[in-house]
Amino acid sequence: MLRLGEKVTVVADAFEQNLPVGQYAYIIAYDRNPDNAFDYVIRIPSLNRNFFVPADDIELEAVVLKQEAERVEREALIDFALSTYNEKLFHQVMNGEQDQTEVEEEVKETMSQADFIKQVNLRAWI
């Protein structure tokens, strides 16, 4: 539950109240009526109005800014990978894949029993 006076951002308009999506607002009251679909009363200073909104329509401003920063960072990495023809970085950013060399090293470390005995015999013979 959000505290009174917190700065939030309008992220949706579920009940089509003509909320300005993307604008900031302040929580001014809770709606404690259990028969009501709304959770908060917010004040949007740019419109100089109060709105009843459900909890899904608003998000803390800090959370929205963090998500936007992550999105911009990901787009910048994709642009850099495309401009430098860095296929490895591109696949890593797009798919979240781990390094192929790391996978190959893991495969090399696990030898079969026959390969291990062969390596021991070769070293013993030398």
Image (spheres, rainbow, N blue to C red):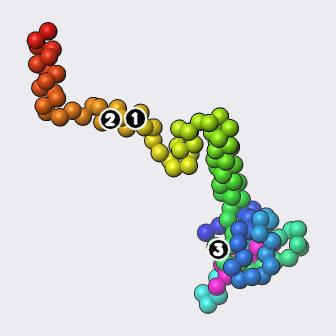
Task: Give amino acid for label 1.
Answer: Glu
Q: Quadrant of residue 105?
A: top left
Magenta-drawn stretch contains 41: yes
Q: Find disc 1 in the rendering and name its residue.
A: 102
Task: Give amino acid for label 3.
Answer: Ala
User: Which one is earlier in the sequence, the residue at label 1 or at label 3?
Assistant: 3
In the rendered image, the residue lying farthest to the front is: 85
Numbered label tally:
3
- Judge the density around disc 3: few (<14), some (14-19), many (≥20) Cα neighbours within 10 Å: few
Q: CA separation, marks 1 and 3?
A: 44 Å
**Is residue 26 visible in this depiction of the protein?**
no
What span is colored magenta in the figure?
37-43
Considering depth in this image, is 59 or 122 the residue closer to the camera?
122
Q: Quadrant of the N terminus?
A: bottom right
Mark 1 and mark 2 in contact (Cβ < 8 Å)?
A: yes
Q: CA separation, marks 2 and 1?
A: 6 Å
Numbered disc in front, either 1 or 3: 1
Q: Secondary structure at mark 1?
A: helix
Q: Secondary structure at mark 3?
A: helix
Q: Quadrant of residue 55?
A: bottom right
Considering depth in this image, is 16 or 33 the residue closer to the camera?
16
